Amino acid sequence: MRAAAVLFATLYLLHALVAAGNTLLSGLHLWLFAGGLYVAYGALFLPLAAGLAAAVLAGFLCDAMSPLAFGTQAVLFAAAHVAVFNARERLQREETAVQVLVVLVLNAALFLVLSLLRLRLMHGVAGAGARLLSDLVWSEAILATVTPWFFALQAQTLVALRLQPARAA
Amino acid sequence: MRIGRSRRYDQARPFVVLGVALAIWLFLPLALKSFVRATFFEMTAPEAVAASHAADLRNFWALRLHSKDEMIAAGRELAHLNASYEIAVQENSALQREVEELQSLLKMPKDERYRFEHAQVAERDFSGWWQRMIIRKGRDYGIPVGAPVVYSGGVVGRVAEVHAFTSVVQLSSDPGLRIAAVVDGDARPISYQGAENPVFGAPKGVIEFVPLDVYASATQPKRLATSGLGGVFPPGLTIGRIDHVEPSADGLFKTGEVALDPRLSELTEVTVLVALAAR
């Protein structure tokens, strides 16, 4: 469980960075969603229990700040984790391109589900859809850029604390 | 055969774990869920407050770079402003006394009075799904849930959650917020709701149940203010500018669009109106 705690610490850092970024971007009405990044590393490289625990805790962290029913994002993150965990043996998961692709697909899927959950409150589906689409495109572009760095940060933290063997570059 | 069964179990194990975790979560008592939520919020609060303090420090050092001449000029401008505000305060006090005398003569119920609690914005969360901000005052300053939040331009929103040292404000641009409103110069109540928040554009709201004889356009906009009905917002606070109305589908009322102040997205300081106990 130490691996889960350490991974959660890196996810807490990610949460702080995303929140600070969203505060700065609020004037432009741009919003960054990084759901896929909370789940991907644990699902691709950690044992089931440790990765799932970190994903659920990260979900609780996101839920605590949102008006959604508490546990919604935790459940979605857990489901996404299980789906990736089950498919990881069939993926070239050491490849950076594959890791980025997994994050982008997960992020888009989580964003879509959350959008569907909030749709009933939105006035003018066309206008709201344009805003959601721009948020998604922008988030995907940012995640494609930061995923290799964040994966390296998570991997190096786990290696430094001897919770994961160093992988060949 | 045994190997095949074991492999199938290995593949299903993650889904079994997920199902068990989900079942446990569903049957967990609500009080425990609320406790977990509050714990996780308080866990994230320091990150928002620390970032806000860092921004304060950055602004402080940026202000220190101004020359003495600039500071003297700013001080002079402030003195002029203070003088005009002092006159306005005196006028306001005289009017307030007059209102109270009239209320006591006519035996009218007294208006609700508020304490102004100024608070700095620690974090803004403006997604397409919701529009919220975290302010740096909570239970420690007696902020109640549902209190109206205002700024110099009018309504900001209402307090949605109160925590130990922070509170969450639901903005007037949030699609989940409804306010009873009136068109300037008209006493009939209409319904306002937060709506679209386009990228790079000003936030918008929508109004419903607008009487058919109300007209507004981009060239002749009308001010939308709070009605005082509903008991949350005091009357007369600006919500936005109505710049478009059209007959609704049923033909009984009109619906319209409200342009909100673009400053709403960049607020750094707001005021919470805390209702005082009836005197």
Image: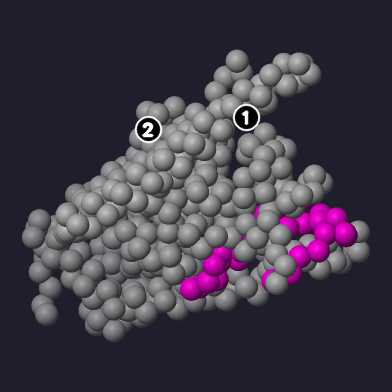
Observer-nearest of A140 and A70: A140
| Within-10-Å neighbours for mark 2: few <14, some 14–19, many 20+ | some
Observer-nearest of B4 and A49: A49
Q: Chain of mark 2?
A: B
**Is A15 positioned to the left or the right of B200 in the image?**
left
- The quarter holding residue A140 reads bottom left
Residue B222: x and y in percent read: 71, 60
**Is B27 positioned to the left or the right of B134 in the image?**
right
**Is residue B160 rendered magenta in the image?**
no
Question: At 69% across and 71% down in the image, what residue appears?
Answer: B218
Residue B256: x and y in percent read: 74, 64
**Res B141 seen here:** yes
Quadrant that contains the N terminus of chain B: bottom left
- The quarter holding residue B125 reads bottom left
**Is B114 positioned to the left or the right of A26 in the image?**
right
What segment carries the magenta color?
B190-218
Residue A156: x and y in percent read: 13, 65
Q: Which label number is shown at residue B164? A: 2
Observer-nearest of A151 and B245: B245
For mark 1, what is the residue? B95
